[in-house]
Image (cartoon, helix red, strand yellow):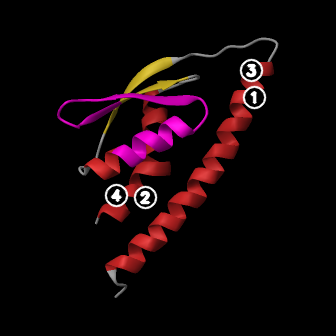
Amino acid sequence: MIPPFFRRLWSGAELCAIFIRELALSSWSVAAAAFARDSRLSPAIIAVPLQLRTDMGIMTLANLVSLTPGTTSLHVSQDRSLLYVHCLDAGATDDVIAGIRETFEDTIKEMEQ
């Protein structure tokens, strides 16, 4: 069995790698949208249901979302169950929520345990 400290350390390293990948991919997408001749963006504000329960976990997720080009965290609901996110090019709401959950939230949840 892996001690909790090393499991959290590994999850933190994994989260850093995921963020760098997402930073590169979303930077490319935003640059392509900015220089496109025929821009067909669909900006939206999306309520993302949170599975995180600690203030540190929610803050980490909100900051990672804001640091990723094309998305900005706007507000956390009073009961800490929703994170409102502005997306430059939203597409399907469920896809945006799944993307945030799969890229950042699941890894942060591992660090909370």
Residue 77 visible in the picture? yes
Q: Which residue is mark 1?
A: 31
Crowdedness near tag 3: few (<14), some (14–19) or many (≥20) residues, C-alpha within 10 Å: few
Q: Which residue is mark 2?
A: 107
Residue depicted at x 50% and y 35% = 66
Q: Which residue is mark 3?
A: 34
C-alpha span from label 4 to label 3: 34 Å
Q: Which residue is mark 4?
A: 109
C-alpha span from label 1 to label 3: 5 Å
C-alpha span from label 2 to label 3: 30 Å
Quadrant where the C terminus lies?
bottom left
Mark closest to the chain's N terminus, 4 or 1: 1
Which quadrant holds residue 40? top right
Residue 99 visible in the picture? no
Left or right of 43? Residue 73 is left
Mark closest to the chain's N terminus, 1 or 2: 1
